[in-house]
Each structure stands twice: as structure tokens, then as C-alpha cells.
Amino acid sequence: VREAFELFDSDGSGAIDAKELAVAMRALGFEPKKEEVKKMIAEVDDDQSGEIDFEEFLQMMTAKISEKDSEREVLRAFSLFAPDSEAGVTEASLRAVISQAGESFSDEDIKNMLRCADMDSDGKISKQDFMQYMKRTALY
């Protein structure tokens, strides 16, 4: 992380601005939006200089990396329920997972599970639905 910071601290000032931060984050595998980068700087920029030093950068990136790992785990869980990620979690795929786990639920229970997490009401749980549901229920 320090190497990414130093690489993009082009003037050697010990601080990077929003533009430099965006490039450093991309180098670390993130795809930040311009507004997201500005917000991130504002959250840790105590002196309101519009720049962050290495310690602030480290704190910010540690949180982002942890968040990315959590997202990866949630997506891995999604793939267990939806072997065909394009099709999403369907009634049939949910029933199969429940059966493989040795559990038994009524058709109505399975339909209720789908309805609860189907954020866009299209009859299946997409990756986006799954992520939103996990965030809403504080499981992610």
C-alpha cells in the first residue's frame, strides 16, 4: 500500500489529492467514481487541504480492502445459491440448496424467502438483489 501511495505522490509532498488517489486506488484493484473519491478524502481530511497523507490513506484503504473482501465473500455465497449467476436465485435453485442442506421448507416458505430478497420484484434474486438484501439485513 505504501508503494502505491508513494508512486502516486508525484510531487513527493507526502500527500495525494483526489486525482492521485483515484489512480492509486485503481492500481490496488478498485474502480472508484470521482464523487466517491472526493467523499473519501473529505472523511479523513482533517485540515481541509483536499489532500491526504499516508496514514490517512492507509486507514482508508484498509477499510476499503476489508469491504472488498466482505463483498467477495457475499458474492461467493450468492454463487452457492445461483450456479448460473445470470439466472439468479430462482425458486428451483433455492429449493435445491435447501434440499442439499438436508432441510425442508414448504413451497410457501420458499416463495416468501424469494419475495423478501427480490428487491426488483422480477421473480428471482439477482446479484444486486442479494447484495442489497445482505446490506439491509446487516449480514454484510
Image: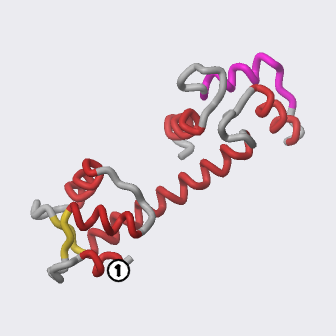
Mark 1, residues whose alpha carbon is within 10 Å: few (<14), some, or many (≥20)?
Answer: few
For the point 20% across and 55% down, the residue is: 42
Work out whether residue 7 or residue 119 is closer to the camera in this orientation and state it: 7
Quadrant of the rendered image containing residue 88: top right
Image spot of residue 115 (x, y percent) = 64, 21
Q: Is residue 60 left or right of residue 84?
A: left
* Residue type highlighted by circle 1: Arg
Q: Which residue is mark 1?
A: 2
For the point 80% across and 28% down, the residue is: 92
Point out the stretch of residues depicted in magenta: 104-117
Image spot of residue 126 (x, y percent) = 61, 34
Work out whether residue 6 or residue 114 is closer to the camera in this orientation and state it: 6
Dominant SS type (magenta): helix
Quarter holding the N terminus is bottom left
Task: Give the vertical position of 56 relative to 43 (above or below).
Answer: below
Task: Give the vertical position of 118 relative to 99 (above or below).
Answer: above
